[in-house]
Image (cartoon, rainbow, N blue to C red):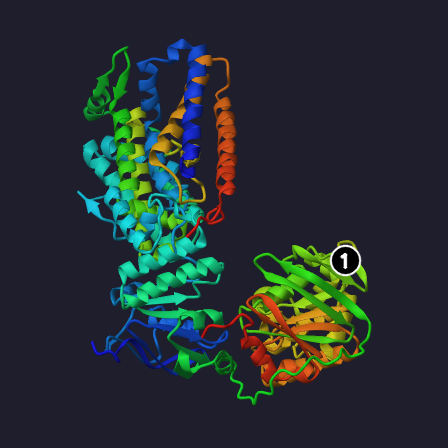
Amino acid sequence: MKRSLRPLAATAVIFIIAYALAVLQFPNMLSTRVLGNFLTDNAFLGIAAVGMTFVIISGGIDLSVGAVIGFTGVLIAVLTTWLGIHPLVAFAIALGVAALFGAAMGFTIHYLQVPSFIVTLAGMFLARGGASIITQDSVPIKHEFYATLGDLMIRLPGGGRLSFIGMLMIVVFLGGALLAHRTKFGSYVYALGGNSVSASLMGVPVARTTVQIYMLSSTLAALAGIVFSLYTSAGYPLAAVGVELDAISAVVIGGTLLTGGYGFVLGTFVGVMLLGLVQTYIIFDGTLSSWWTKIVIGVLLFLFIVLQRVIFAASAPGEKSPEKV
Amino acid sequence: MADGQYVLEARGVIKIFGSQTALDSVDFGLRRGEVHALLGENGAGKSTLIKILTGAYQPDGGQVLVDGQPVTLDNPLHAQTHGIGTVYQEVNLLPNRSVAENLYLGHQPTRFGLVDHRKMERDARVLLTRYGLDLDPGSELGSHSVAVQQIVAIARAVQLSGKVLILDEPTASLDRNEVERLFEVIGDLKRAGLAIIFITHFLDQVFAIADRVTVLRNGKLVETQVLDALSRTDVVRLMLGKDIAFSGATDLEPENPTTDVLLQFSGYGRKNGVAPFDLTIHKGEVIGVAGLLGSGRTEMARIMFGADPADQGSLRVNDKPASVRNTTDAISLGFGFCPEDRKAEGILGDLSVRENIIIALQGKLGWFKALNRDEQLEIAGRFGESMDIRAASLDMPVKLLSGGNQQKVILSRWLATDPAFLILDEPTRGIDVGAHAEIVRTINRLRDDGMAMVVISSELDEVVAYSSRIVVMRDREMVAELRGKNINPGVIVQAIANNPDEATP
């Protein structure tokens, strides 16, 4: 097996074992209802994590994701509830604003040679602050279009429901996987994460790709914000605080190397599901504090970082037994 | 295209960096189907010329011509569209991606807008077979040896450019078999009509594969010659610029009755560094180290000082066994080391002259015996005076000083620790003539005071002037030890050039 697949395989195995153990304790967890809710409850996180996967594979980080989700929610709420604009138009505006925002961050990162950590940290404060200036309070969204989207779902056998936002997340994951593994853009993203100097010498359009990566991440964060507003039917400037960290955790647990160059979009899906499983288990148990979610995620994250170190240090590039030439 | 016409040509190319002329109207012509070696010591202008030919730099004067037509090469990618491809010493590929993707990145075959992995790997397999590589194109590049990666890089460059191939020290990290394998590939490409520029520090390899050779020195063209007409010694002479009557090596003189032995290195070496060497150093002796760039001079110094610790052999200091596993060991044994790259490894640019001078002494004293400011000033002042360091104040940042004064600061730093053995790597590089003479005087004075020194230098006249013995390095091996009458530039050049196992060309 390719070594880059090993962390992903480990995640999948852990997910299956953990799920099996959970089902042994709470047989109800094995139902389409729980599975459907898995997807619905984690849709916004999953969508944001797809963008984060691209950023991390390229060797960067995007800390602005949670703030962009919060900003988008507020923007949409204000546009629809206060100004009476149709939600679809509001969605388009929000996605456009986020794309420009991401492009600006990408420009800064590439042309001013500022680490992505700093730039997106500034972006995080900007977006969060911007949202708080528009409104301090939670703005409810009441529009029949929201109700329509809320009712849009596929009924699964066994009482489960695959909601619109759950399906949207799956579509984003599939699209992301296609983009990462089957397009030139995808190969450029991996190239940047491998070695940006080599990449530019090999003709990768580094500037364009960098800008596109952060545009993609911010746009998907805005889409996650739309999903979040559908999920909560409100816009709140302090919504989704810290989601960027959950997204990073999901990406890393899903087998993407934090230093860039290796990773899978579908691995992130498994990562998100594993996080969702932990949460669901704690809800089922009922006696545990919800902070246990954080502790378990912390332990998992630590395990996976150690695992990646071990796997990648054991066979460092070029040091493997040189074959005959 | 006429046979004599150049595929790629530089005419009177000039490149100026600040006040320094890196290339002074250099002419260079490359023919179809030849391997053209480009030689020169560090700073000779090789890499500047290559960067102009690949579009990384723009010339300040002169022209670059492709197929006889003047062109402006904006960047390496633009040069690629003119058929000029480059492979660098550090393999500039992506170890995290598959071999096939490394071959075709940016030019992947697509189907319905999506990358067609299957076709790409099929094409890659066909291409690799032509280079004699039988490997899975889907495998990660980083899992293969450097030699394979190097060949993949060549395959990519040839595939994308296909007229001129520039190989910038491609063999630096390859072993002997891998080099041979690479040479077969180069030979095939040459027969296929490619024009190849080959840059290396290894003369053997030049003679093994090149048809013509161009030697640069100090930014000037020295000569372009058909290699058949040249001997190894001629080439070294062209590179070092020594027009010396050759006296030929005489028999070894009987060993001078010298003073006590200070250091005995026996079988000392490091894997992938320097082949094991034996060297005995007496008190009050200066050992000059000569050799071309990349011959292992600096590596030897670093091994002696423990910067890259030896992994074989033994060392005796004052006839007692000792071991140098790191630089702290070396300093406590009374060693000192002035590295070649002053800016990167020597001075602490933002610290003051005073701090730069006392830092090694402080390191030797250890954590708890801090020198107070008065002591520091006293020490720094003493050396500032005796070494004639010209600084407005001992508290000014050392990076503001001239190269020569910086070198004196570093020298003072080690002298403050009262060393028994000092290693100087290119102590006179890049400093003006006056300071140069002073450094040489200091070396002589220290020797008379009984200090043992190893001095590495490319300036043969200089090495000859102060050395009591000279060791010659070639291909990371100590190949000769010269004393007495043999200490003259002629013999040194021959020792550098000669290859005991040379039977060919």
The front one of B35 and B17 is B35
Q: Residue furthest bottom?
A: B245
- The N terminus of chain B - image quarter: bottom left
**Where's residue B452, x and y in %?**
75, 72
Query: Dot 1, crowdedness within 10 Å: few (<14), some or many (≥20)?
Result: some
Residue that mark 1 sits on: B322
The kind of residue tagged 1 is: Ala
How many marks overall?
A: 1
Relative to A17, residue B480 above or below: below
Identity of the residue drawn at 77% across and 61% down: B316
**Where's residue B191, x and y in %?**
30, 67
Within the image, what quadrant is residue B224 found in? bottom left
Within the image, what quadrant is residue B297 found in? bottom right
Q: Evaluate whether residue A97 shows in this view.
A: yes
The front one of A144 and B420 is B420
Relative to B134, residue B294 above or below: below
Identity of the residue drawn at 39% across and 74% down: B49
**Where's residue B294, x and y in %?**
53, 68
Within the image, what quadrant is residue A112 found in? bottom left
**Where's residue A186, x and y in %?**
30, 44
Report in which chain the residue with disc 1 lies.
B
The front one of B187 and B42 is B187
